[in-house]
């Protein structure tokens, strides 16, 4: 297969390919390549610079190397989290919700099919299956993610596919799922993506099926007397806005669910302070968020010159965080959860 495109260095969109024509093509190609890799195809990519041997164009090509520095700094959101961290984070979030992974307003007895979108390692799906197995032995579980990087090597009976939440799902998934779950896409989605995402998720829900979307967003970082929380909030607000993203993610999901015609839409929150045993784990989670997402956002939004400067700023903030914790100013973790139902007579999508 051979593809033609301009110099990679010319297009910052190559690290976040989105909807404008060429970028959309790249995004689809990336997804198809991941799907072929999942099907055990070996893919090799050769880039042959179109300007090779043409002096004027070669000069242009070398200046594009400077731009590629910017591209390297421009990391996709899924690389902000490493595998053990996602699983550690899941354990804390489960405890914050007192291990109620599916909200009690969702009747679990009749749940035969569950989808987790932006699944990462599939850890939520795995734990939910343990809960549901008690009543439904043959339920179907499918994890979707824009990248296969973190999919488990041995998925067992679980299915995993590469799928961008902002693109329509293949028809075989339409009207298929009793429960669709999404968690922690705040740093990945642009504000305008939420409407499309809700519409795509509604399409894969069975009529009468439930959507549950969880975020640690703007509301998690409100603390009048903690300068570390204030700095994280400032940085996230600045960086996400600069990328056209939405820090008030759960409020946005709530609003878009209502607009889409989903019913029984509620927005709830869970606080780690309800469980005093969670104090140390919450403190460690925040240190980890500073080390990964905070540092990454500093760099992505150009607030620091390079990775070293980002790590240094993050390290200083982590130190301040631990000093405050030692003074008894331990932060709380707030998880936002939106639950909504697709009407039994379906939706006009
Ligand atoms: C912070 S992780 C959360 C993973 C998982 N939901 C959890 O809570 O453990 C965000 C995940 O969303 C995925 N992601 C980012 N953008 C996406 C998109 N447009 N469509 C689907 N998945 C996406 C990333 O690859 C990553 O695995």
Image (spheres, rainbow, N blue to C red):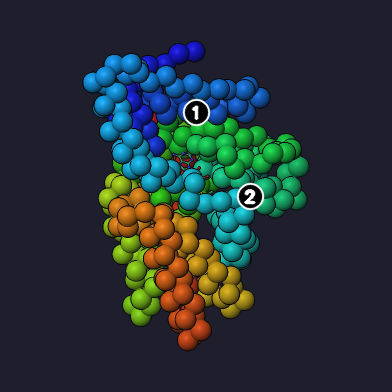
Disc 1 under 8 Å from ligand 1? The reply is no
Residue 243 in view: yes
The residue drawn where x is 48% and y is 62% is 291
Q: Is residue 211 above or below residue 307?
A: above
Identify the residue position indicated by label 1 in the image. Answer: 31
Which residue, as the protein is rendered here, is positioned at the far left?
56
Residue 173 in view: no
Q: Label 2's element?
A: helix
Foreground disc of the pair 1, 2 = 1
The residue drawn where x is 66% and y is 24% is 40
> Quarter holding the C terminus?
top left
User: Where in the figure is residue 274, as x and y percent of width and height?
Assistant: 54, 75
- Specify whether 172 is left or right of 348: right
Sequence-wise, the earlier of marks 1 and 2 is 1
User: Where in the figure is residue 153, as x and y percent of width and height?
Assistant: 69, 39
Q: Is residue 39 above or below residue 253?
A: above
User: Where in the figure is residue 140, as x and y percent of width and height?
Assistant: 67, 36
In-front residue for pair 303/309: 309
In-front residue for pair 196/283: 283
Identify the residue position indicated by label 2 in the image. Answer: 123
Specify few, some or many for label 1: CA neighbours under 10 Å numbering under 14, 14-19, or 20 or more: many
CA distance separating discs 1 and 2: 22 Å
The residue drawn where x is 40% and y is 42% is 72
In-front residue for pair 342/323: 323
Which residue, as the protein is rendered here, is positioned at the far top?
1
In-front residue for pair 109/212: 212
């Amino acid at each position: 297969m051979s593809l033609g495109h301009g110099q990679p260095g010319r297009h910052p969109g190559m690290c976040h390919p989105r909807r404008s024509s060429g970028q959309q093509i790249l995004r689809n190609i990336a997804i198809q390549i991941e799907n072929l890799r999942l099907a055990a195809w070996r893919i090799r990519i050769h880039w042959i610079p179109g300007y090779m041997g043409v002096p004027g164009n070669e000069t242009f090509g070398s200046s594009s190397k400077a731009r590629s520095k910017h591209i390297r700094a421009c990391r996709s959101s899924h690389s902000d989290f490493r595998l053990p961290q996602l699983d550690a984070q899941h354990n804390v979030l489960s405890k914050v919700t007192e291990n109620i992974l599916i909200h009690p307003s969702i009747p679990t007895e009749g749940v035969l099919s569950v989808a987790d979108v932006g699944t990462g390692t599939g850890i939520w799906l795995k734990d939910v299956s343990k809960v549901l197995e008690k009543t439904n032995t043959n339920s179907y579980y499918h994890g979707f993610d824009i990248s296969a990087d973190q999919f488990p090597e041995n998925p067992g009976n679980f299915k995993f596919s590469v799928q961008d939440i902002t693109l329509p799902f293949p028809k075989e998934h339409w009207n298929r799922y009793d429960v669709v779950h999404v968690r922690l896409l705040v740093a990945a989605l642009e504000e305008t993506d939420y409407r499309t995402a809700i519409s795509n998720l509604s399409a894969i829900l069975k009529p009468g099926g439930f959507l549950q979307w969880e975020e640690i967003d703007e509301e998690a970082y409100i603390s009048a007397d903690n300068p570390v929380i204030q700095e994280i909030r400032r940085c996230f607000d600045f960086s996400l806005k600069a990328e056209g993203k939405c820090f008030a993610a759960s409020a946005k999901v709530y609003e878009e669910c209502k607009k889409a015609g989903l019913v029984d839409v509620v927005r709830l929150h869970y606080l780690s302070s309800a469980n005093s045993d969670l104090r140390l784990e919450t403190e460690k989670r925040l240190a980890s968020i500073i080390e990964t997402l905070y540092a990454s956002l500093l760099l992505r939004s150009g607030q620091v010159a390079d990775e070293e400067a980002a790590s240094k700023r993050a390290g200083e903030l982590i130190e301040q965080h631990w000093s405050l914790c030692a003074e008894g100013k331990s932060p709380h973790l707030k998880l936002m959860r939106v639950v909504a139902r697709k009407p039994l007579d379906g939706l006009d999508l």
